[in-house]
Image: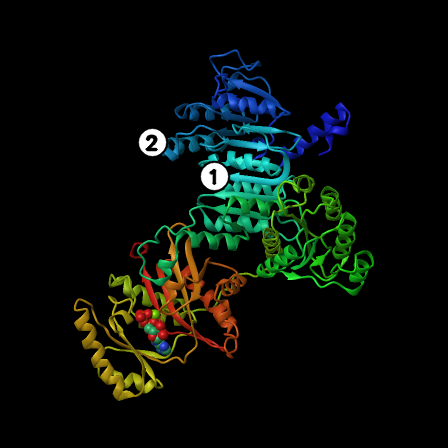
């Protein structure tokens, strides 16, 4: 906001307007854009939080009024001090609370009485300390809701709004960051101070900076909603430790990220990435569904880009916060060094980007101005002695070319390289185009001044071309997410009663596991592709069943006590005729009875033998916190060893099922492979959707495996099925 060129009167008016606009519609306006701020627990004691906040508020140039509150003092740091919130004259929208935990709830009550809309509770000593703290936090929330006060924290670092109309630093961080387009919110307060320091060194500015601590009242969803509307914010960064409501987060985040045109990218670090030993699971799906996989699914469905490190987070944020999104994946590389140009090319290809192909006209423009030894093909090599004029010609030409979606500018410092001039023209080129421009001035000391020019003018810079390629690739992915076709979840016509009957029968018998024929029946009721089969409860039934089936068949032991049949020698495939089937029946019953004398054997399940195909796994598991997750991946006996699976929270739109097929590492196995045509993607996609419908409609299903599902160029067959129920749910 360019308020500094205005006369004082207009400046005040502009401030008022901005403040009024900001307060108008949003529930968190009092938190981010308060007219007055009270600091409860304001103090002059060195090293106290109460002093640090008050000093920060003053130093940041907060445009509203400040009110220290402390019953033991008349003034604090030269400001008139009120004994309590009640005694303050004038409007206060926000109370920053830095007093011992037991006294906080009372202050929240006072906020309510005084009509203070928001409070930031910096104080620790709540949920994070144990049961007593948790009780205290519960009471705090209850009182806040009753008093109509929105509470940030407790146990947080506070909040910063760099918007010059407010200039609010209500935190005890050491310094106010520069203004920028990046909003950052964090569940960890300690990380915040490091981030602020790091960002300062990297010349990264923020629009809003929020530490939300224990998120007792205001949580990430409230903040997302606010930031989505904040005109200062272009990209939202989150550091998360946990989420309470996965589906709610997905729905909200999809609105923020996915709205085409006005969407804002969300980048997130979710810590606790290593699976914390998935709970004792009876299925492959259950054992593969660690917490981390759940969060991967949530982030993917929400359109949130999940990153691993703080470094990566800011690498991406710099570009997302300053550059337009590329319309496609065709990159132009302009360099003064051959080797780095090749490195950049390789990195782009590895990241799924393509090298732009220039038109003859573009190449002619370059050829006319560049020395004969230069390359006008992509990567454009300006040769080591290039000065800024060569960069200008090349960069203007490639950015104007219709075949280019983005540009990477690489520089290595030779004696004659006029680094700062080049930096300035890269800035100008970036401002003159709607395509993203990213720079990599490779080196350290010599290039530092150039990098400074780039960064302070909003051109993202990375020390190596690989980083630049990774960032561009993330932008392309985000862009394709935003412009994806919108699909709804499909509801299939199914035989719900039949599935219910099978599940209910088992439950009535006090059984939480279905035997395979029962599981197949449930799947069949939901239109999943099972094979013709029958259960032989005694030898005499083998002939009857085989008469209905075509050979060869497969015989499997049927027992609710045996989940992994192969492990007890309970599966015999490729049984050619009736005589063999009868002999196999005898042998299976005897062998398994010997191996598992305790097991309740129901007989032998006889199934047509499916032809060879590609073995996949489809499964579902109910997460205690987030609900049903559907899994897809490479199946068969190596499923756990490969761990090549993806999850989605159900229900999900049709397109999500399609994405699941595309997201496994081994996706090429689904494509044409060794002369075989690709497998039937539509059939698999529909299986995933039908499976999702099944587990959404039957909360009693705790774990479900179809391993393997054998996929063919046309259709698929679920040859094995396993369903475990939750007896508590009935
Ligand atoms: P489990 O997983 O309990 O050991 P399965 O029913 O999955 O038992 O059978 C083990 C393996 O036998 C399967 O992974 C599959 O390769 C093969 N198999 C089982 N049933 C069939 C069938 N009907 N057609 C073809 N192959 C089958
Ligand atoms: Mg199996």
Residue 592, image x, y percentages = 21, 73
Asked if residue 637 is positioned above or below residue 4 in the image, the reply reads below
> Seen in the image, is 568 located left or right of residue 97?
left
Q: Nearer the viewer, residue 599 or 306?
A: 306
Q: Nearer the viewer, mark 1 or mark 2?
A: 1
Asked if residue 291 is positioned above or below residue 693 in the image, the reply reads above
Toward which corner of the image does residue 694 lie, by quadrant? bottom left
Which quarter of the figure is the N terminus placed in?
top right
Q: Residue at 52% of width from left, 31% of height from top?
A: 158
**Residue marked by disc 1:** 187
Which quarter of the figure is the C terminus placed in?
bottom left
Residue 173, image x, y percentages = 53, 29
Any mark on residue 208, and which? Answer: none
Lower sequence index among marks 1 and 2: 2
Q: Residue at 79% of width from left, 57% of height from top?
A: 371
Any mark on residue 132, and which? Answer: 2
């Amino acid at each position: 906001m360019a308020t500094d060129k205005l006369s004082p009167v207009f400046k005040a008016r502009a401030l008022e307007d901005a403040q009024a606009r900001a307060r108008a519609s949003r529930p968190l306006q009092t938190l981010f854009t308060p007219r007055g701020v009270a600091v409860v627990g304001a103090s002059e004691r060195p090293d106290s939080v109460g002093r640090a906040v008050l000093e920060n508020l003053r130093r940041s140039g907060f445009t509203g009024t400040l009110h220290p509150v402390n019953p033991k003092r008349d003034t604090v740091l030269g400001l008139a001090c009120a004994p309590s919130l009640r005694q303050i004259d004038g409007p206060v929208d926000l109370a920053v609370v830095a007093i011992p935990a037991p006294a906080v709830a009372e202050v929240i009550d006072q906020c309510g009485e005084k009509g203070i809309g928001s409070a930031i509770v910096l104080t620790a000593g709540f949920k994070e300390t144990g049961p007593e703290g948790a009780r205290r936090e519960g009471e705090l929330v209850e009182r806040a809701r009753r008093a109509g006060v929105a509470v940030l924290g407790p146990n947080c670092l506070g909040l910063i709004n760099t918007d010059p109309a407010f200039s609010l630093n209500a935190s005890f961080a050491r310094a106010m960051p520069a203004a920028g387009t990046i909003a950052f919110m964090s569940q960890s307060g300690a990380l915040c101070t490091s981030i602020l320091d790091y960002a300062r060194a990297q010349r990264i500015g923020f629009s809003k900076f929020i530490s939300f601590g224990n998120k007792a009242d205001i949580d990430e969803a409230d903040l997302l909603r606010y930031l989505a509307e904040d005109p200062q914010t272009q990209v939202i960064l989150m550091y998360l430790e946990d989420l309470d409501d996965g589906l709610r987060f997905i729905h909200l985040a999809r609105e923020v990220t996915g709205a085409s045109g006005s969407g804002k990218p969300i980048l997130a670090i979710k810590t606790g990435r290593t699976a914390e030993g998935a709970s004792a699971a009876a299925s492959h799906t259950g054992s593969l569904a660690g917490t981390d996989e759940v969060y991967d699914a949530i982030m993917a469905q929400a359109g949130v880009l999940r990153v691993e490190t703080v470094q990566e987070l800011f690498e991406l944020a710099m570009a997302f916060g300053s550059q337009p999104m590329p319309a496609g994946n065709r990159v132009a590389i302009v360099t003064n060094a051959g080797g780095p140009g090749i490195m950049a090319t390789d990195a782009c290809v590895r990241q799924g980007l393509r090298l732009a192909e220039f038109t003859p006209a573009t190449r002619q423009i370059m050829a006319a101005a560049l020395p004969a030894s230069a390359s006008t093909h992509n990567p454009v090599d300006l040769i080591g002695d290039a000065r800024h004029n060569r960069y200008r010609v090349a960069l203007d030409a490639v950015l104007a070319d219709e075949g280019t979606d983005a540009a990477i500018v690489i520089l290595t410092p030779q004696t004659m390289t006029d680094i700062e001039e080049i930096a300035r023209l890269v800035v100008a080129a970036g401002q003159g185009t709607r395509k993203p421009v990213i720079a990599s001035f490779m080196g350290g000391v010599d290039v530092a001044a150039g990098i400074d020019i780039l960064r302070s003018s909003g051109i993202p810079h990375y020390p190596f071309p690989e980083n630049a390629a990774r960032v561009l690739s993330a932008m392309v992915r985000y862009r394709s997410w935003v412009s994806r076709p919108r699909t709804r979840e499909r509801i299939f016509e199914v035989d719900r009663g039949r599935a219910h009957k099978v599940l209910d029968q088992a439950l009535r018998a006090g059984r939480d596991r279905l035997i395979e024929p029962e599981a197949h029946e449930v799947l069949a009721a939901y239109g999943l592709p099972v094979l013709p089969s029958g259960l032989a409860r005694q030898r005499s039934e083998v002939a009857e069943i085989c008469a209905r089936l075509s050979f060869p068949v497969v015989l499997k032991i049927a027992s609710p006590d045996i989940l992994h049949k192969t492990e007890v020698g309970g599966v015999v495939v490729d049984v050619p005729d009736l005589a063999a089937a009868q002999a196999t029946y005898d042998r299976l019953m005897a062998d398994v009875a010997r191996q598992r004398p305790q097991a309740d054997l129901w007989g032998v399940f006889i199934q047509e033998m499916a032809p060879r195909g590609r073995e996949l796994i489809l499964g579902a598991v109910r997460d205690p916190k987030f609900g049903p997750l559907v899994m897809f991946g490479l199946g068969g006996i190596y499923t756990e060893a490969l761990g090549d699976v993806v999850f989605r929270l159900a229900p999900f739109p049709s397109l999500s099922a399609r994405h699941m097929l595309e997201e496994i590492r081994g996706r090429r196995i689904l494509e044409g492979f060794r002369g075989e045509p690709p497998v039937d993607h539509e059939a698999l996609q529909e299986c995933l959707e039908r499976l999702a419908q099944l587990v959404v409609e039957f909360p009693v299903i705790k774990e479900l495996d179809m391993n393997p599902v054998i996929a063919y160029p046309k259709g698929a067959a679920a040859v094995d099925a396993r369903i475990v129920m939750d007896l508590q749910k009935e």
